[in-house]
Image (tube, rainbow, N blue to C red):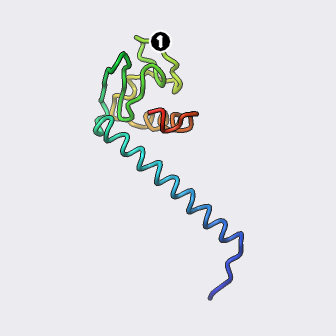
C-alpha cells in the first residue's frame, strides 16, 4: 500500500542520509590516516622533528598522550604506550577526542 511522504518523513530520511554520509566520509578519512601514518601497525612508533608519534593513529606524544619523557598536554589522559598494543579500543576513544577537537581531522 502506498502513502504520501510527509515533510517530516522526508526530512528524517534526508537527515539519516546526511548522517550516514558524514559517518562514511569520516570513516574513510580515518582509514586513509591509519594506512598512511602507520600501515595498520598497532606497534608503530616514530620520532620526527622532536615529536614522538604512537600507534595506528600516529598520536603525538606532545599533545594527545603522556610518554613520561616530554612535556605534554595529554588531552586523551592516557599513557602513550597504551597506543602500541593490540587493543585498539583506547586508540579509537582518543581518535574520537581528536576528531571532536577544534582542529578536527586537521589535527593529524
Residue 84 placement: quadrant = top left
Residue 5 placement: quadrant = bottom right
Instruction: Please give the residue where the numbered disc 1 appears in the rendered image.
Output: 71
Please state which of residues 25 and 84 is positioned toward the viewer in this rendering. Answer: 25
Neighbourhood count class around disc 1 (C-alpha, 10 Å): few under 14, some 14–19, many 20 upward: few
Number of numbered discs: 1
Q: Quadrant of the C terminus?
A: top left
Asked if residue 20 lies left or right of residue 45, the reply is: right
Q: Is residue 1 above or below residue 15?
A: below
Asked if residue 24 lies left or right of residue 8, the reply is: left
Q: Is residue 4 above or below residue 63?
A: below
Q: Secondary structure at mark 1?
A: loop
Q: Is residue 32 above or below residue 47?
A: below
Tell me where residue 44 appears, x and y as whole percent.
30, 29
Q: Is residue 83 above or below residue 33?
A: above
Tell me where residue 7 appears, x and y as whole percent.
71, 72
Which residue is painted at 51% across and 27% down in the image?
A: 76
Residue 39 placement: quadrant = top left
- Extreme-bottom residue of the structure: 1
Which residue is painted at 52% across and 58% down in the image?
A: 20
Tell me where residue 1 appears, x and y as whole percent.
62, 88
Asked if residue 73 lies left or right of residue 61, the reply is: right
Please state which of residues 82 and 62 is positioned toward the viewer in this rendering. Answer: 62
Please state which of residues 35 and 40 is positioned toward the viewer in this rendering. Answer: 35
Amino acid at each position: 500500500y502506498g502513502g504520501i511522504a510527509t515533510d517530516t518523513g522526508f526530512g528524517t530520511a534526508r537527515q539519516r542520509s546526511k548522517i550516514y554520509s558524514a559517518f562514511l566520509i569520516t570513516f574513510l578519512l580515518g582509514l586513509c590516516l591509519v594506512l598512511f601514518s602507520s600501515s595498520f601497525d598497532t606497534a608503530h612508533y616514530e620520532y620526527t622533528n622532536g615529536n614522538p608519534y604512537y600507534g595506528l593513529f600516529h598520536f603525538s606524544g606532545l599533545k594527545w598522550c603522556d610518554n613520561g619523557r616530554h612535556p605534554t598536554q595529554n588531552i586523551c589522559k592516557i599513557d602513550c604506550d597504551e597506543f602500541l598494543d593490540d587493543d585498539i579500543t583506547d586508540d579509537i576513544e582518543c581518535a574520537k577526542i581528536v576528531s571532536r577537537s577544534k582542529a578536527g581531522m586537521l589535527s593529524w
